[in-house]
Amino acid sequence: MYCAGVVLGATLAAAVWLYTYRVSTLVQYIEYIGRTRRHFRPSERVMEQPWWGVPATVGLILIGASVSLWLLPQRRRVIERVGAFFVKPSV
C-alpha cells in the first residue's frame, strides 16, 4: 500500500516538474521583401515550453497511475470498480 502511494507521489512530482520545464528559444521577426531583409524588432531569447511537454506529462501521469493501481493489494477490485463506473451494464 505504501509503495503505491510513493510511486503515485513521485509520479505527480515528476509530472509537475515536466509541465513547468522550459527551454530557451531564439525568436526573430524577419520579413523578406525581394532580396532585402527587414527586421521589425531585434532578435531575442525567450523561455517557452517544448512541444513534447504536455504529451509527456499526460503519459507520465497515466503510467504512474497504472503502476500505483497495480501495486495495490486488491488491485482487481479497484480496477473493476473504476471500470464499472465508466461502463454501464446493458439491461
Image (spheres, grey):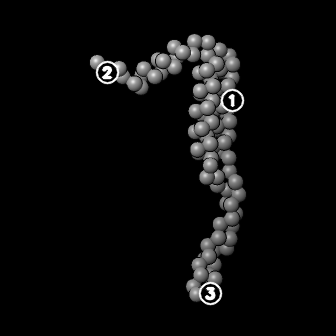
On the image, the x and y values in percent for residue 32 come to 59, 81
In the figure, residue 48 lies in which quadrant?
bottom right
On the image, the x and y values in percent for residue 25 come to 68, 60
Dot placed on the residue nearer the N-terminal end, 2 or 1:
1
Residue at left 68%, top 16%? 2
Residue at left 46%, top 22%? 83
Q: Mark 2 — residue? A: 90
The quadrant of the image that shows the N terminus is: top right
* Above-or-below relation of 64 to 25: above
Task: Inspect the image, locate mark 3, and give the three-letter code of the amino acid beneath it.
Answer: Arg
* Above-or-below relation of 75 to 56: above
Q: Nearer the viewer, residue 21 or 63?
A: 63
Of tags 2 and 3, which is closer to the observer? 2
Residue at left 42%, top 22%? 85
In the figure, residue 13 lies in which quadrant?
top right
Left or right: where 46 falls relative to 31: right
Label 3: which secondary element: loop
Q: Mark 3 — residue? A: 35
Name the mark on residue 2: none
Crowding at label 3, few (<14), some or many (≥20) Cα neighbours within 10 Å?
A: few
Label 2: which secondary element: loop
Q: CA distance from mark 2 to mark 1?
A: 39 Å
